[in-house]
Image (cartoon, rainbow, N blue to C red):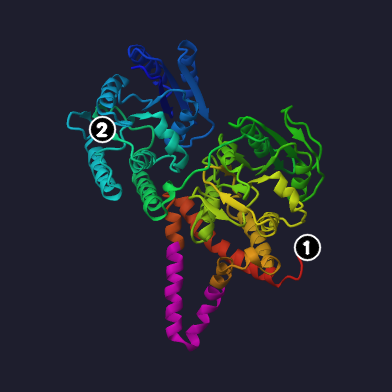
Amino acid sequence: MQDKISVIMPAYNEGDNIYHNISETVRVFNNLRGTYEIIVVDDGSRDNTYQEAQRAAEIYPTVLVKKNDDNQGKGSSLKYGFQLATGELIVFLDADLDLHPEQLDTLFQVMDQTGSDVVIGSKRHPHSQLNYPLDRKIISNIYALLLRLLFRLPLKDTQTGLKIYKTEVLRKIFPRILCKGYAFDVELLANAHGFGYKITEAPVILNFRREARWGRIGLYTLYKTGLDTLAIFYRMYILKYYQRALPQIEAFPRVSIIIAAKDFNHYAQEAIERCRNLNYPDFEIIFLPDPPCQIPYEEVKVVPTGPVVPSKKRDLGVAASSGQIIAFLDDDAYPVRDWLMNAARYFNDPDIAAIGGPAATPEEDSTMQKASGAIYASLMMGGNQGYRYIPKTYREVDDYPTCNLIVKKSDFEKVGGFNTNFWPGEDTFLCLKLTRELKRKIVYDPDVLVYHHRRPLFLPHLRQIKSYGLHRGYFVKRFPKTSLRISYFLPTLLILGLSLGWLTVFSYPMLFSIYLLGLGIYLTMAFLTGLKSFRLKMALGIFSGIILSHFTYGICFIKGLMSRRLPEE
């Protein structure tokens, strides 16, 4: 074996075994007569996995250990590891070693003999030896049949955690991948097959000793896996998403990250710390609190603004910036490690003024915060704008929130910045100027991802909904080019129908029957939306939260629509 090998080991809560398993992997690769590196990515473990892996790295110079601050999914960890890899061949190896790395010699031989670009271990290979529970065999067989029907993959198994890829394959495919967890392997292999790479299966010896760390086979796991798989099918065959040409990163201009806040709080500290660890070569952080304050980061520029609205703060932040690119971030949001790197591929396109991405709800948020996030992301509340809250496919947009918006400074200055007292709604005002006055594009990329802490149900969430409804109703008159849309009227029309429909019982019994049918469908849809969480407390919160959100937004939308002027003007 002449090529350098990069072994990527994603690990989650493997503290009892990781030191031994790394040692075993080192022993195996020392006998392969080639150069290698082992990259262990701890995916936000709650035990001592990271410390034990670091202990192994202190002994073995070929081992590199990195850590996600929170649990992002196996796919995300593999992607992180690949960004650090320097080998010509990439090995995916599960850290539990249910599949021992000694078997890799067989996979390497298959790659050499067949000239394949990808070789995967397969439980369904006729020469495989399995110690595997019956229930998992049944589920695996059903899922394999589904994949053959959907994607016409010439493979009998995609989920076994032992794979070898040529680096060129992953370099082409990884930027297109959206799944972070359940169906990650399927998305990767379906794209490899779609781009014409040769994939071959090899036999494995599997000794299944315990429940998998990467997700137990329960109803929720099956539901999410099925949902993610169908989403891949939709992106591949309906949207043709994976076939689009991706822009290439040509330069890394300096980026100024602008964080507006009232004060230096726990969330703001988290946002700054995550920004300090970004994978990007040239950036600065500008923090804008109301009063002067001391923060424990010398490299962060602090610009006290006094008690002004966020739009004014951000204008002041841009004035103090030295970057060619401005990245706006809320103080209760934090970016993933490759936030700026993923946005960088759009910086050189003169037609693009801004790049946005999803603001997903963090896993560590409370149940009621997660319920709030689920309401925003749902079809019933977010409508066709659910992409703002969970990763969806690439698209062009004309209105995007500043909790995660990256703008070219030259274009920002051409339109005079925000220059408004609106809040919320300052982002609508800015985007309107960028798209209508400058005729520039705003693009959405799901990999330009931040996590945004939600306001919990019920009162904090509803106060935010109230403000959104009031401003959107007013903007229908003030900025009709981006706000005069039927989707913004639907909650108001809905509550009018639900509130007044019962009056038909006196004069129009047939209409009353239709009203009852519509009410039943509405309540059923809200209930089913809540059930997606598979948690009773959260499901009830989502169900009642959707109804209260619709009424709050709808009433405030009417108030905004009838207002001659908003107080901040």
Q: Position of residue 494 (x, y in %)?
A: 53, 71
Residue, disc 2: 201
Q: Nearer the viewer, residue 206 or 218?
A: 206
The C terminus lies in quadrant: bottom right
Q: Quadrant of residue 451?
A: top right
Q: Is residue 559 above or below residue 531?
A: below
Q: Quadrant of residue 341?
A: top right
Residue, disc 1: 567
Q: Is residue 145 left or right of residue 402?
A: left
Inspect the image, locate mark 1, and give the three-letter code of the amino acid beneath it: Pro
Is residue 141 within the magenta segment?
A: no
- Report the disc number at residue 147: none
Look at discs 1 and 2 and give the one toward the viewer.
2
Q: Which residues are magenta?
A: 496-525
Q: Is residue 66 above or below residue 185?
A: above
Q: Position of residue 414 (x, y in %)?
A: 74, 51
Inspect the image, locate mark 2, and give the three-letter code of the amino acid beneath it: Glu
Q: Is residue 406 left or right of residue 422?
A: left
Q: How far apart are the alpha carbons under marks 1 and 2?
A: 66 Å
